[in-house]
Image (cartoon, helix red, strand yellow):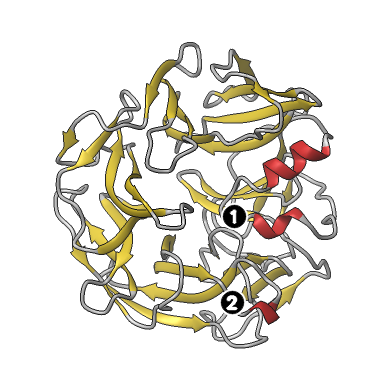
């Protein structure tokens, strides 16, 4: 595989920066595993993983994949050489049992520009591909499909009006209004809803009562949306929740958030919700994506109790993506130095497996927990219960 392409693809994800170096992980074999590092087996009634097929014959290297709740999905891949990259799209229809290449709307990438596009699935057969602008406060280009990639509609991230609600299947996004003084981030922005019917961006009429730059933080329960920002009273990172699809918002009570931490993200658990806050740790810890705090809520996200905080030299020191919350309430953190598991609500963690180095990136999707490898090899795993995992691969070996 082209080294320049591999490096570019690895660094696309926000938390994947540290994954650009380190030893290669042990390859996965077999159709079902208990997760990287052999997390303990659950007695969940949702143990069967979704039947996602492999597609090693797809051209290029897979760098993005996303799913709808019915098991359909999309993936983006790229073939790169000395003169640039050709971008590809493939589609998985629910029950089809195979990935099908479709005509890509994306232009070839020339020179050393790299791959910057993102993928959001907005429901069965619906997806939005976004190419950000070179300037964070300028609109990016988009391509939207509602027919499994048979046709694509060219658009923009520039908002085209307002909406009082976030429709079912829509995604929340940030519309940046001002660039930070250092030019590397957003200083002021507003929430927009990405409509599942058209892919258009609409400004949300009722914005959360938070200060700072607002950040979508999770859509983890029916009609419940979470957004991260700054508490107007304390200036600390916190969350706001909407139980009516964005018509109204209320701030949550979040104790123990780290002042310098990044925006919290929310993931579901069978008996509650969990929030993770990553950020920069002291340089002596040797990680780039530090794990600062973990919080739990048992009242639908109204109040949050901190169950983990960073302590010097105590693992897990880092996190790549979301923590995995199994149906038995076990917590697993995939980090820059391996996999760490807790059976006692983050009071203690133990190392899972002998491998050391970046352990892959995990995020919550409508289909379950999705793991992708740290080395741009197109290796993925998916789990409905956080314990039993189904392996599949996409793109050239």
Out of 290 and 324, give the one closest to the viewer: 290
Q: Image point 41% across, 64% down: which residue?
A: 263
Q: Judge left or right: residue 74 versus residue 101.
A: left
Residue 9 point in image, percent of width and height: 68, 41
x then y, percent, for residue 397:
83, 34
Asked whether, in this view, residue 145 is left or right of residue 13, the answer is left
Which is more foreground, mark 2 or mark 1? Answer: 2
Residue 360 visible here:
yes
- Identify the mark at residue 281; answer none if there is no mark: 2
User: Residue 393, relative to residue 183: is it above or below?
Assistant: above
Q: Position of residue 89 (x, y in %)?
A: 60, 23
Q: Secondary structure at mark 2?
A: loop
- Asked if 207 appears above or below 324 in the picture, the reply is above
User: For residue 228, which quarter of the picture?
Assistant: bottom left
Q: Earlier in the sequence, mark 2 or mark 1?
A: 2
Q: Is residue 43 left or right of residue 58?
A: left
Q: Quadrant of residue 121?
A: top left
Residue labelled with disc 1: 362
Q: Which of the pair 246/285 is nearer the observer?
A: 285
Q: Residue at x 80, y 26 (%)?
A: 81
Mark on residue 308?
none
- Few, some or many C-alpha atoms within 10 Å of disc 2 (few <14, some 14-19, many ≥20)? many
């Amino acid at each position: 595989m082209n080294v320049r392409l591999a490096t570019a693809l690895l660094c696309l994800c926000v938390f994947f920066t540290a994954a650009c170096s380190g030893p290669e992980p042990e390859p996965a074999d077999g159709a079902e595993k208990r997760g990287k590092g052999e997390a303990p087996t659950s007695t969940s009634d949702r143990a069967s993983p979704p039947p996602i097929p492999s597609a090693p014959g797809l051209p290029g290297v897979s760098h993005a994949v996303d799913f709808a709740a019915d098991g359909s999905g999309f993936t983006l891949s790229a073939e790169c050489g000395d003169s640039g990259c050709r971008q590809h799209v493939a589609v998985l229809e629910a029950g089809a049992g195979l990935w099908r290449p479709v005509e890509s709307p994306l232009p070839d990438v020339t020179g050393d520009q790299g791959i910057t596009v993102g993928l959001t699935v907005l429901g069965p057969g619906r997806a939005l591909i976004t190419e950000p602008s070179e300037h964070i406060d300028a609109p990016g280009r988009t391509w939207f499909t509602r027919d499994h990639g048979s046709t694509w509609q060219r658009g923009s991230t520039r908002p085209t009006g307002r909406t009082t609600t976030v429709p079912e299947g829509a995604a929340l996004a940030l519309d940046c209004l001002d660039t930070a003084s250092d030019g590397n981030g957003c200083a002021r922005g507003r929430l927009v809803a990405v409509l599942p019917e058209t892919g258009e961006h609409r400004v949300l009429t009722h914005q959360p009562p938070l200060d700072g730059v607002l950040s979508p933080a999770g859509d983890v329960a029916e009609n419940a949306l979470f957004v991260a920002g700054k508490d107007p009273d304390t200036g600390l990172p916190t969350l706001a929740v909407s139980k009516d699809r964005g018509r109204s918002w209320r701030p949550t009570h979040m104790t123990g958030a780290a002042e310098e931490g990044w925006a919290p993200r929310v993931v579901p658990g069978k008996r509650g919700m969990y929030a993770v806050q990553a950020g920069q740790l002291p340089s002596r810890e040797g990680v780039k994506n530090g794990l600062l705090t973990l919080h739990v809520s048992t009242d639908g996200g109204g109040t949050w109790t901190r169950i983990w905080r960073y302590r010097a030299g105590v693992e897990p020191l880092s996190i790549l993506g979301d923590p995995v919350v199994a149906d038995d309430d076990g917590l697993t953190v995939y980090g820059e130095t391996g996999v760490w598991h807790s059976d006692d609500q983050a009071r203690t963690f133990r190392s899972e497996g002998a491998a050391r180095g970046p352990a892959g990136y995990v995020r919550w999707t409508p289909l379950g927990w999705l793991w992708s490898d740290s080395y741009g090899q197109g290796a993925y795993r998916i789990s409905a219960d956080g314990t039993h995992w189904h392996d599949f691969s996409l793109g050239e070996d």
